[in-house]
Image (tube, rainbow, N blue to C red):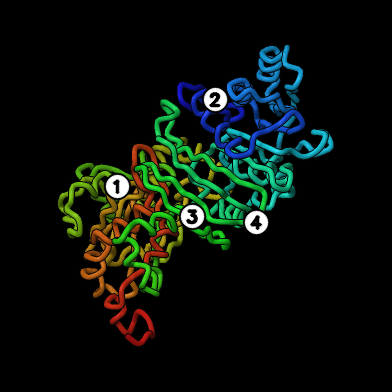
Amino acid sequence: MGKMKIKENIGKITTPLDIALYMVNKLFRNRTPNSTSRILDAGCGSGVFIRAILNWCSRENVELPEIIGVEIDSELVSITRKKFKGVDKVKIIQADFLTINEKELAGKFDYIISNPPYISYERIQFKKRDLYKKMFKTAIGRFDTYMLFFEKALELLKIGGRMVFITPEKYVYTVSAKKLRELLAQYDVEEIELIYEDVFQGIIAYPTITVINKKPPGITTIRLRDGMTIKIKLPGDGSPWLARAQICRSSKASTLSKYTHRLKDIAMRISAGVATGCDEVFVIPKRSLPEELKTYAYPTISGKELSMFKPGEAIDYNKLNYVMLIPYDREGKLLSERSKPLIKYLLRWRHALEDRYIVKSGKKKWYAFHEKPPLKDILRPKILWCDIAREPTFYVDPKGMLVPRHTVYYLIPKHPNIIPKLVKYLNSDEVREWLRVHCQRAANGYLRLQSHILKKLPIPRFLLRYPYTLDTEV
């Protein structure tokens, strides 16, 4: 991060020295180490934190503590050992931090500092996934390795010890980090600081510095990127922390907290659009549609195309340029290969369709979609929005003719009569602010408007005044 390079094989990102010094100041704030203190740099890389610790001790005229660096990459181990060869108090161990045990490290530590590798679930080797799931309580769902570093560090930290990590901010709100939040909330999370986004030049990681003391929980100071500081008691149930903090400072978002019902209560379905697995074949220009394929063609729209319309506006089907060829009937059953007009057309691209992983694995026929489209639900009046957007904006498919692509989410209400009022509410300032608070960040300040977040959106009582939505007295 910063002017850094990523070692793609291990997801390692080098911390800029100024950030390392900043973190070391937090590590030793109001608790100066001494010659008998033990410090662990977990995933030490080329030793930037070790250098920062040595600089701090020299500046403060403090005798060097014992410093242990653990690094899995043999090349980096060699570089770092040479760098600190003349410093007796520094020892570099080549090992996987997540599997090394306390005995191999000669005991627990007073301080731990780390910039863990950011390896997403998809990039973790299958064998290691299984091993980590057995070893760590936080290895749940689509976990990232940096989450496991938190748990491992807490195991190796002495009672009363302190750890300082720099990681992506995602752990404070993603579903996959729920168990991690439950674990961390058992201790004193002293500070969470969301530092400036471009600290790692060329990498959008939304970096966050977390300070944890291994003692009973207290009040947490959360420092936001706009300079605002919020002090809160972190929830222990694994619910998102950042949302809790930002609601405290947002009057518009906080007004929604009084509502007891959620969007999922009035929705039949809230889902991502259809994933064909090969839009290049199944999505074609409307003007190029052969007459014999019209039976299988449905108007379709992408997230980019939604921006042609005004917020809350009904989609004008005449302005859409593409159709989706769907080899399924209304019940979601895959059509027979004897459906000659369509199958004959798709045969032209059979090689490309068979090259998809879902087909190679034997899970799908060669002309099937990546996911079965629930046409019975989709072909109803609905509300649409982009999966990633700078500003949350909602649109209407009034006749239920559209099949949204995978870059578009859709909501099917339990009764279509509610759509005009509902879309107006969804485009309100209050809802937009709530979504800014609760949604995961994408690159360049955009938001990920995922279904599991939308389902939790509080809704006012006037949206419940339909006897066929909820058996609720209003």
Q: CA distance from mark 2 to mark 1?
A: 37 Å
Q: CA distance from mark 1 to mark 4?
A: 49 Å
Q: CA distance from mark 3 to mark 4?
A: 18 Å
**Which circle, 3 or 4, is nearer the viewer?**
4
Residue 269 in the image: x percent, y percent? 39, 66
Q: Give the mark nearer the N terminus: 1 vs 3.
A: 3
**Residue corresponding to mark 3:** 241
Q: Nearer the viewer, residue 57 or 101?
A: 57
**Residue corresponding to mark 2:** 14
**Which circle, 1 or 3, is nearer the viewer?**
3
Give SS at disc 3. Answer: helix
Give SS at disc 2. Answer: loop
Q: Identify residue type, mark 1.
A: Ser
Q: Give the mark nearer the N terminus: 4 vs 2.
A: 2
Horizontal relation, residue 461 to residue 219: left or right = left
Q: CA distance from mark 2 to mark 3?
A: 27 Å
Residue at x-position 40% and y-position 30%? 198
**Residue corresponding to mark 4:** 216
Give SS at disc 4. Answer: loop
Residue 207 in the image: x percent, y percent? 47, 37
Image quadrant where one finds the C terminus: bottom left
Horizontal relation, residue 137 to residue 413: left or right = right
Residue sticking out furthest to the front: 61
Residue sticking out furthest to the bottom: 473
